[in-house]
Amino acid sequence: MALRTPLYDRHVALGARMVEFGGWDMPLQYSSIRDEHTAVRERAGLFDVSHMGRVTVAGEGALESLQRLVSNDVGRLQPRQSLYTVMCNDGGGIIDDLIVGAAASAGVYHVVVNAATREKDVAWMRAHLGSGTSFDDVSAETGLIALQGPRAIDILQPLVDADLSALRAFTMAELRVSGVPSRVCEVSRTGYTGEDGFELYVDAGAVGTLWDVLLEAGAAEGLRPCGLGARDTLRLEAGLRLYGQDMDESVDPYSCGLGWTVKLDKGVACIGAEVLRGIKETGPPRRMVGLRMSGRDVARHGMSVFREGEPAGEVTSGTYSFTLGCGIATAYVAPEVAASRQPLSVDIRGSMARAEQVPLPFYKRPPTA
């Protein structure tokens, strides 16, 4: 039986279509994926992401342990800052992609992991902790809501007593949210949609109240509850990777365009560092490229990519872009194919659909005034 977040009954009451995702019953959509997608791009959307895992790493050895576990440089974090990174195996393959945040207290870090990989991640991390490090899986104790879109700050600002404009991307603050009694939320200026927004961490027992408060506060701003469908179309437009489709343990960070998260000279070598150094020097065996499809053609995960009639790669993610009005996809191709920028074709159920190679991301949010 699939697990349920504390918001499950609220999703059902709102008429959500529920599906199993990563071992959890989650809302796919409440109205239509198009409407929810558009709400986030133009106004704001509210997502339940309480299925994500969260662990705490602490102690005098916490920093060194994390430096070994992840590719990015955790040592550069100031209190209440966070970063995006990957965690690799000995062969340089990606075990998961993570967010690591430094708490206000010295030597305390919070790590957000993907729902479907939580058990694997926890086991790997526990097995590779150094001395002087404590580890606590607090996933069941934590609720997580994402408020995303250009009006997110207008919705949240009246509910808190701090200036949210001072909260930069990938920074956090502990705030009280009006209407959520006696609860302190950790508010992070992060998201998975390509829009401005916030992710709010709160005790699992208070996440329902927080959800209700945000929905009510955002009603006048056009806020919509949003499901996994819109989350996927939004993240793909923004060029954000999805673990299990765009990357897994057979994929190195350089191949999927995440080489910028690998810091090989940070003082403590991460697991797989020597292999990663070799890949960086010689070049990855394949490259992730963006594909813009013709008309309404939609490529899907696993479909074959061709150049001049010859096999050239495979689609990792694909969807119809409501923002751009065409199909978009990411695919792995040989380095020389990526460098050529030649038009490609995707075999869509026996028909060859033309695909133009384009830079990632497909969409960038407009600069704020």
Image: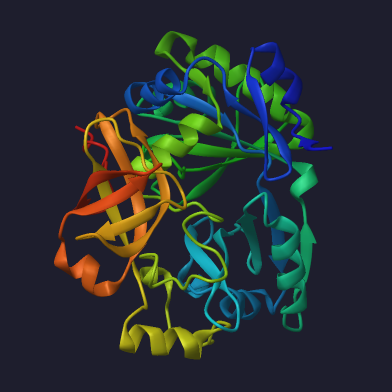
- Whole-percent x and y of residue 318? 39, 43
Rendered residue at 39%/48% (across/down): 169
Above or below for 196 versus 287: above
Looking at the rendering, which quadrant does residue 265 occupy? bottom left
Q: Is 141 on the left or on the right of 188, as rendered?
A: right
Rendered residue at 30%/37% (across/down): 327
Position of the C terminus, as image quadrant, is top left
- Whole-percent x and y of residue 118? 71, 56
Looking at the rendering, which quadrant does residue 264 occupy? bottom left
Above or below for 137 versus 327: below
In front: 255, or 203?
Answer: 255
- Whole-percent x and y of residue 147? 50, 31
Q: Is residue 285 visible?
A: yes
Report the residue that reaches farthest toward the front. 350
Rendered residue at 75%/75% (across/down): 133
In front: 248, or 219?
Answer: 248
- Whole-percent x and y of residue 233? 42, 36
Q: Is 316 on the left or on the right of 120, as rendered?
A: left
Rendered residue at 40%/36% (across/down): 234
